[in-house]
Amino acid sequence: MAGYQSDRIRNIALLGHAGSGKTTLCEMLLHKVGVSGAPGSIEGRNTVSDYSDLEKDTGHSLETSLLHLPYKSSCINLLDTPGTADLFGRAISALPAVETVAIVVNAKHGVEIVTRAAWEKLKERHKCALVIVNQIDEASDCEGILEEIQDVLGQECLPVNLPTSDGQVVDCYFTADDSAQTAFGSVDEAHSNLVDQVVEVDDDLMELYLEQGESITVEQLHEPLEKALRENHLIPVCFTSAITGAGVDNLLKVMNELMPTPAEGNPPLFLKGEGEEAEEVSVVPDADAHVIAHVFKLSLDPFMGKMGMFRIHQGTVRNGSQLYIGDGRKPLRITHLNKLQGKEHIAVDEAGPGDICAIAKADNLYFDAVLHDSHEEDNFHLKTLQFPDPMASTAVSPLHQGDEQKMSDVLQKMAAEDPSLKIEFRERQNETVLMGIGDIHLKAVLDKMEHVFNMHVATAEPSIPYRETITKPSEGHHRHKKQNGGAGQFGEVFLKIEPLERGAGFEFVDAVVGGVIPGPFIPAVEKGVREAYDQGGIAGFQMQDVRVTVYDGKHHPVDSKEIAFVTAGRKAFIEAVQQAGPKILEPHVAIVIHVPAQCMGDITGDLASIRGLVTGTDACPDGSLDIQATAPLSSVGDYSNKLKAMTGGEGTYSMKFSHYEAVIPAVQKELINQWKHPNEE
């Protein structure tokens, strides 16, 4: 495969809501450039980018796929990303690899959840933007869709082509022909709007345009247009149909001639150092400079091993190159450098700045790693990409006894290739908990574990981390005396307990005087108290916010032993807890719910039904609302699905721990009845 200079490369990530037609559009683009004889289809299970059996079975993208389109003398690298909101973390992993984000909008449905989220993310990462309005063959109001895009994303979104009434598309930028009949607007007006927008970023060109009345050529517009793209002062909008092919040729021309090369886009956000001492560093697409590349995707396969997909930002990588991984001291030797066309691996001898490549069986690679060939680039890293917080969780356990280690290994592989997936082992509950963006995310992970790694697991609702505390001071006493003929056990403890402020934790105070409990035995008393504190006094949940003061006791010069004071301390504490107004606490979470304004009544009513409390509302510029609330964690386990049902899929939410609060009496009684206190000696 022939290599390309960086000024001949365009790197573009396709982001958009599920059903916007990204994968189908990729098929038509591949067909138009001659890579495929006929476009594949989702229904036919033969698309280039959705090649896994799981993707074919579900009918939508689960992973980001790389495609390369040879077009004229250039190469357009396309990253086709998942569109499901629950898989948005996987989609945005592609952003560090590209200069341009193309947001694909369904012409029938307009701006949707992932459209908005993608727009916010590309602005955060300083990416150039392109909007593709797809499926115009099935739309009835393309003008209305354009107006909605401009209302939500900004008036900088201007069409570079316009649909006709018969389902075709007319160019408005390169060869603007005002005699062409369009479904709305005019070619001349669209062209003028584009030129006006571009010249605003170039004073000299603006003067030429306004004062001299000069006609501005496409060549004169190129540099200021690239500046306008970098500043998001211009967002080109292309109308297409991935099914009929309308507008796709024009889209290819826009991608190739308007969208930036690696040198024309905003520079990658590389830093050197950590924390506040980190400094921005310049990385340029120079083929002769030191190699700097970034791993933005990992795939793990039981047969292929670990495959890393990386973008080269600087220098040239060749077969035989020795590259350091992050701050590692042992270099990785590149032996099989590949470019990808979906699942197809195409061997190449070398690749330069702007290229996106892959290497397999690289066990030491990790997501977000920087590859470099000189220690001068040690401590280089890209600005951290912020992923959505996990909102769904499930506890997993192996179906077959003895598979515990295998499950742990497979879970670590899942987490390594998916940075938006979190795995937590909760020792107290003896639970392994998977946490993902949503239920579809978790299902995709569990399906891959089963079908790819043959790891079958059982799932359950994770245990709620309840806590116990006390509400008033009290005292406890226990004498532990045990005689079995020979040396016995003796220890006696008097203590008092009192509640502390929420969040204060545990305090142990030694107030013993006169040596009634010898100093060497005080740690044993504390150990017994802590055992009971961790085990709970009434329902088996760890306690919190208690001060324990040991003030008296007795010992025996022969029979007193450490275990005697451990037992005495534990039982004295349990006795005190029973008389201290014990309460069970449950975790409450703070939720921010983003919904259309018309859904507010349904949302607040539902929150009230689950013991939630609305703490505030904020109006958003697009007319939607952010509703702030708190609610018990136990009542929001299925909130993702409930919110989708209440808002028609338009609602999103974020959630984080807020505080602990006492459960209602009925719940406390139920939890106490469920607990079996461990046998005491």
Image: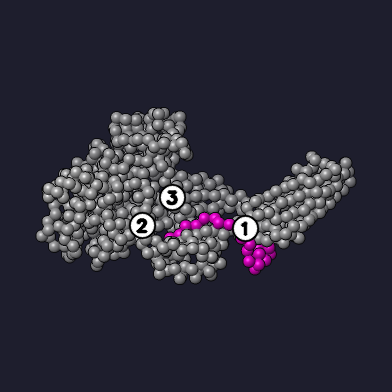
Report the residue marked by disc 2: 116
Q: Amino acid at mark 1?
A: Tyr
As rendered, which of 630 and 521 lies closer to the eye? 630
Residue shown at the point (35%, 50%) measured from the top left: 123
427 sits to left or right of 351: right
Image spot of residue 13 (x, y percent): 32, 49
Q: How many marks?
A: 3
Q: Residues within 10 Å of mark 3 (few under 14, many from 20)?
A: some
Q: Which of the 4 quarters of the picture holds residue 337?
A: top left
Where does the image place residue 394, in percent across and percent down from the top left? 52, 56
Q: Is label 2 or label 1 in front? A: 2
Residue closer to the observer: 566 or 364: 566
Q: Check disc 2 and give the amino acid type.
A: Arg
State the image quarter where residue 612 is shown: bottom right
Q: What residue is at 74 percent from the left and 57 percent from the top?
A: 473
* Distance between the alpha carbons at the discs numbered 3 and 2: 15 Å
What residue does disc 3 label?
387
Q: Earlier in the sequence, mark 3 or mark 1?
A: 3
Question: How crowded is the residue under tag 1: few (<14 C-alpha within 10 Å), some, or many (20+)?
Answer: many
Q: Are marks 3 and 1 in contact (CB under 8 Å)?
A: no
Three-letter amino acid code at the position of disc 3? Phe
Query: How far apart are the alpha carbons under marks 3 and 1?
Result: 28 Å
Q: Secondary structure at mark 2?
A: helix
Q: Which residues are magenta?
A: 649-675
Q: Which mark is residue 571?
A: none
Residue 664 visible: yes
Sequence order check: which comes first, mark 2 or mark 1?
Answer: 2
Residue sitting at x 33%, y 56% = 16
Q: Nearer the viewer, residue 198 or 385?
A: 198
